[in-house]
């Protein structure tokens, strides 16, 4: 009999509850998050030799604990937080929110649900996910610095900077400012600091892009052959997909990334609407590919034009194209996996 051990992870502590196949609680424990957390949990679970650990958000807050258990030879599955919450509220019989009930709900959700992702030791895909996130964070920081600099430049020159913001143009504009008051002098000084921040982030992004290019090349992926998917977007896709074998079909993959529309029919009227769920990072990566394809003559642009000619509005045509590109991405990932397996 397999014993399912649900874990509700927190920053300072972890609560674990063991249940049997009838969902009866066998035992529970709360351990402090520390260097010996894995050892203490395994010692507590030793009476259950045939066990599976179910960790809520094993790629989020429970990441370190999940990796430590896998490294110790344990079998671990990842339970999405929304699934365990739904189980606690609707199907566990204990709707009150506390750590033992949360951990029990995680275990019940894992026991009832087939196809949960198995946690494995970090692979190259996780490296790409980390590097892609860092690159996007740098892009946001660069954008913030540029917006703040532009706001300050508008106080120094009517209209601010008319062209795209960059370090050279910003410095040229500041060099032309006539410093005739103390206020102007301070504005120029702060603006120079923003320009320095801009230069710093751009240098970091250049280094990050080179690092990503090497990491993506090491995967020998064919994703970059798809128009609109560069090294950053490819890294995001590979990092968030992980093992493509967990998706049974292109439709399953589209549902996961949110490109499969949701039916919103009523009576005789059949319609579909935007899917706000799914992995939004993957959805964003596919959206980037779509927008790029719309800018140039290609099969994607032709498909979009056909949908518009059929009477779909621009947003509906874009959603249809996103689904098609999702299918192309899925086929590329499957082909890459088969090639590496041979």
Image: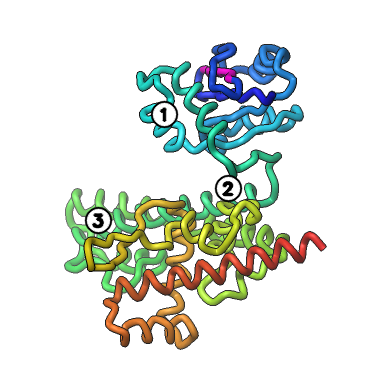
* 307 sits to left or right of 43: left
x then y, percent, for residue 58: 56, 35
Residue at 35%, 19% (x, y): give it.
Answer: 96
Circle 3 Cα neighbour tier, 10 Å, few/some/many (<14 / 14–19 / ≥20): some
Residue toward you, 324 or 140: 324
Q: Is residue 199 visible?
A: no
Q: Are marks 3 and 2 in contact (CB under 8 Å)?
A: no
The answer to which of marks 3 and 2 sits earlier in the sequence is 2
- The quadrant holding residue 214 is bottom right
Residue under pointer 1: 91
x then y, percent, for residue 121: 70, 39
Is the residue 109 above or below the residue 158 in the image? above
| Dominant SS type (magenta) | strand
Residue at 63%, 47% (x, y): give it.
Answer: 126
The answer to which of marks 1 and 2 sits earlier in the sequence is 1
Element marked by disc 2? helix
Residue under pointer 3: 152
Q: Which span is picked out in magenta?
A: 13-19
Circle 1 Cα neighbour tier, 10 Å, few/some/many (<14 / 14–19 / ≥20): some
Cα separation, mark 1 vs mark 3, equals 55 Å
Identify the disc placed on residue 41.
none
Colour scheme of the picture = rainbow
* 94 sits to left or right of 23: left
Identify the disc placed on residue 130.
2
Which residue is outermost to the right?
342
Is the residue 70 above or below the residue 283 in the image? above
* 287 sits to left or right of 341: left
Residue at 36%, 22% (x, y): give it.
Answer: 95
Residue 54: within the magenta? no
């Amino acid at each position: 009999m397999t014993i399912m051990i649900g874990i509700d992870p927190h920053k300072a502590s972890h609560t674990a509850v063991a249940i049997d196949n009838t969902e009866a609680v066998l035992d529970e424990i709360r351990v402090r998050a520390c260097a010996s957390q894995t050892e203490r949990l395994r010692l507590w679970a030793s009476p259950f030799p045939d066990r599976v650990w179910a960790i809520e958000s094993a790629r989020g807050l429970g990441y370190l604990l999940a990796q430590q258990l896998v490294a110790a030879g344990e079998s671990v599955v990842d339970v999405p937080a929304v699934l365990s919450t739904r189980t606690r509220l609707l199907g566990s019989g204990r709707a009150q929110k506390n750590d033992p009930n949360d951990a029990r709900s995680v275990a019940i959700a894992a026991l009832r649900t087939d196809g949960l992702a198995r946690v494995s030791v970090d692979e190259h895909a996780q490296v790409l996910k980390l590097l892609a996130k860092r690159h996007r964070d740098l892009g946001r920081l660069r954008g913030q610095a540029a917006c703040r600099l532009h706001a300050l430049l508008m106080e120094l020159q009517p209209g601010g900077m008319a062209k795209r913001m960059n370090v050279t143009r910003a410095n040229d504009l500041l060099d032309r400012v006539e410093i005739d008051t103390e206020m102007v002098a301070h504005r120029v000084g702060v603006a120079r600091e923003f320009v320095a921040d801009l230069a710093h982030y751009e240098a970091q992004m250049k280094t990050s892009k080179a690092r990503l290019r090497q990491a993506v090349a090491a995967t020998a992926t064919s994703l970059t052959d798809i128009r609109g998917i560069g090294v950053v977007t490819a890294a995001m896709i590979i990092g968030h997909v992980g093992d493509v074998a967990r998706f049974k079909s292109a439709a399953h993959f589209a549902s996961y990334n949110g490109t499969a529309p949701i039916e919103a029919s009523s009576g005789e009227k059949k319609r579909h609407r935007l899917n706000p769920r799914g992995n939004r990072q993957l959805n964003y990566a596919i959206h980037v590919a779509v927008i790029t394809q719309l800018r140039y003559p290609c099969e994607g642009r032709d498909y979009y034009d056909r949908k518009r000619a059929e009477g779909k509005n621009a947003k509906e045509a874009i959603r249809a194209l996103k689904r098609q590109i999702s299918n192309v991405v899925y086929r590329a990932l499957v082909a890459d996996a088969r090639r590496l397996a041979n």
